Amino acid sequence: MELSENMNKLYDKDGMEKVMRPIDYVTDAVGQVALNSITVLSGQMTYFYTNKVGMAAATVGTILLAAKIVDAVTDLIMGKLVDKTNTKRGKARPWLLRMLIPTMAAIVLLFTVPAHAGSFRYVYALLTNIFASAICYTAVAVPYYTMIAYKTRSSEEKGNIGRFRSAVGYAVGVGLGIGLIPITTALGDDQRAWVILACAFSILTGIGQFVTYKFSLERYVESEGSQEKESHISIVEGIKILVKNKYWVKITVFGVCMNIMYAIIMAAPIYYALFVAGDQAFYSTINTVNLIPSILGFLTVGFFIKRFGLTKTAKIASIIGIAGSLVRVAFPGSIPVTLIAGSVVMYATIPLISVLPALVLNTAEVNFKNAGVRMTGMTNASNSFVGKIGSGLGGALVGWILAWGGLDAVNKGGAMTNKLLSAVYITNIYIPLIMFIIMLIIIWKYDLEEKLPALIQENAEKEAQE
């Protein structure tokens, strides 16, 4: 019987058992609706605040960055809470249920800023962004991404979990990108229209989060001895362990760059549509065209992960992103080039987002080797941390650069200037290119994946002796 069971087991190229079923991937991935509803809608806050509520672009950029900086603290706290959580329903999974109602509320509150409340608008915007990102997003994202380590030990399956999750995330992002302007225009093209849209995504968020909570399995957890040791490690001690982990440091910087790029790709194109194409509806066209590379990305990233592994997949994607961006640099004002080369850039983001969670979680094994604890929750908190710091910097850069270009003056009836046009090109083309280059440099000699199978075996033997 035991021989028969072993014969039915499947293993990845590194010899790690594969345990995920198709239904496991699906029910896990719908939890991404909550995270992407917050991140994608938050990515539109610069446009919403400046063009629908009349707030100053530079101040908006500062508010968005300030909210993300607060996240640097809450991420680490949440990572520590996950490491200390130990219930019959698991370590990470219970938080999805606990945060369901607050997360739904946070999405709606983002858009209920009092339009005629003077300076209070900025206070309200800051507080609701902190609540949505530093509290709700953190308390869902850190456990959600940590669950990957508890679901499987196969790097291939971890990569595929990331692929399914990013597919759902992109469906939310592209769906909003295509429908945002037509839907809000049909609903009245005012603040009320945005609130209605936010309510719809709030409901979808609640459904997705509950399904993931209900049907997720945490198959692998640390030994009781390891959990006991982790419970006595303070946040400061945990940070010291992480910064001594060179792989964690590298992949954290990599993640910040990726999320700066992603935030700008989400937030900046609407200004390209307004000031280069001359029609805000072109924003929907960009997102419609990007459906093609998105679908191709999800169809091919599984092959890349299986054939080349996580690290080489990230290298290939970075090179593709650089190539697409360089074409846009050569023809910045060309609408056809924007659609075609922009699609290449969009394609490159799919593998990067797919492999990042697994690359982060794999560094926990280095923690165990160095300090005798994996600190999976705190390690993974960096995935949420880099997402929010990166998106905060990305959103702030859009606001600051457009303010430098004179966006506020144009919104008040002033004439379009070459300086504003340059600001649009910088945000849409040059910053993503710089991020791709930095990511390629970081990942070029990243060798943890090659060492991982032997490291896992070594750590397992060490843990069995405790």
Image (spheres, helix red, strand yellow):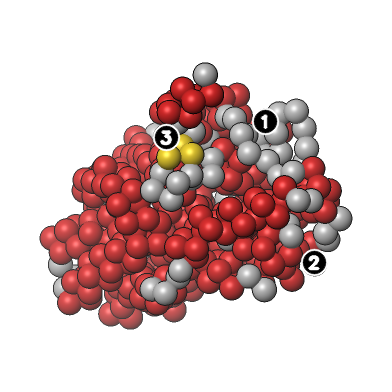
Label 1 and label 2: CA atoms lie apart by 29 Å
Say few, some or many: other residues with alpha carbon within 10 Å of mark 1 (under 14 / 14 to 19 / 20 or more).
some
Q: Secondary structure at mark 2?
A: helix
Q: Quadrant of residue 411?
A: bottom left
| Residue 320 seen in the current view | yes
Q: In the rendered structure, which amino acid carries the disc numbered 2?
A: Glu
Residue at horizontal 24 percent and vertical 49 percent from the top: 293
446 or 268, which is in the foreground? 446
Q: Please tell me how many numbered marks the rendered image carries.
A: 3
Q: Type of residue at label 1? A: Leu
Q: Nearer the viewer, residue 266 or 445?
A: 445
What's the residue at 70%, 55% (across, down)?
462
Is the residue 409 above or below the residue 296 in the image?
below
Residue name at image x 81 percent, y 47 percent: 225
Residue at numbered disc 3: 10
- Image coordinates of residue 452 in percent, x first then y, are 51, 58
Judging by the rendered image, the residue that carries numbered circle 1 is 97
Is residue 34 among the parts visible in the rendering? no
The residue where tag 2 is placed is 237
Of the two numbered discs 3 and 1 on the same chain, state the one appearing first in sequence: 3
- Residue 108 location, quadrant: top right
User: Disc 3 versus disc 1: distance between alpha carbons?
Assistant: 32 Å
Q: Is residue 190 left or right of residue 111?
A: left
- Label 1's element? helix
Closer to the chain start, of discs 1 and 2, is: 1
Q: Disc 3 vs disc 2: which is toward the camera?
A: 3
